[in-house]
Image (cartoon, rainbow, N blue to C red):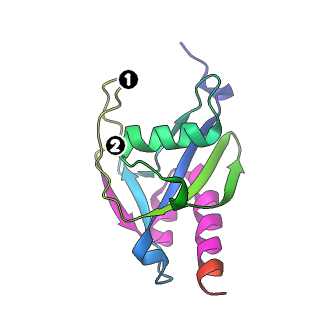
Amino acid sequence: MTDRSNKVGAGFIVFKKDTVELSEPLILALVREDGQFDIPKGEIDDGESTIAAAKRECFEECSLMIDDDEIMFDSFVHGRLTTYCAATNKLPIVTKNPHTGILEHTGFKWVGKEEFCNNCLSYLAPAAHYFYSECIKYYNH
């Protein structure tokens, strides 16, 4: 059995682009079987950069290819998770993990920050708060 406590990961907080520009950012919430919200994220493979891992996980978990011009701000590190932020109008499609064949999420929703943070895995809330406030500052300067 693998000891996951020492693993480092990377992922994306994904905003719906047209809502970010209106200063009402909606976050992509991947819905787990237990109803909690998640983001596209996962373990970093040996020799893989954090941004490459985040992009790979985003594609594997919800079919979103994040382009460099969709990435916003610097990364946010909390514990062993490096989180990036992107804004896109692409439509996510939740799929089975191509390596394990497991469906890790039952669907997705676009939600506001409060709904996301009230229903997400607790260690994801700091990144959501950080990137949400960065979006608000950037678009309301």
Residue type, label 2: His
Q: Position of residue 29 (x, y in %)?
A: 41, 57
Using residue 11 as the reference point, say whether residue 50 is left or right of it.
Answer: right
Q: Main secondary structure of the magenta part?
A: helix
Residue 137: horizontal and vertical position, in percent? 65, 80
Read off the residue under disc 2.
105
Q: Residue at x 50, y 43 (%)?
A: 55
Front residue of 11 and 78:
11
Q: Residue furthest top?
A: 1
Question: In the displayed structure, does residue 8 sit left or right of residue 95?
Answer: right
The picture quadrant where one finds residue 106 is: top left
Image side of residue 57 versus residue 43, left or right: left
**Magenta-colored stretch includes residue 112:** yes
Residue that lies at the very extreme toward the bottom in this rendered image? 141
Q: Residue at x 64, y 59 (%)?
A: 126
Q: Residues within 10 Å of mark 2 (few under 14, many from 20)?
A: many
Image: 21 above or below 88: below
Q: Is residue 38 above or below residue 130?
A: above
Count of marks placed on residues = 2
Separation of residues labelled 2 and 1 (CA atoms): 15 Å
Q: Which mark is residue 14?
A: none
Residue ID for mark 1: 99
Q: Which residues are magenta?
A: 107-135
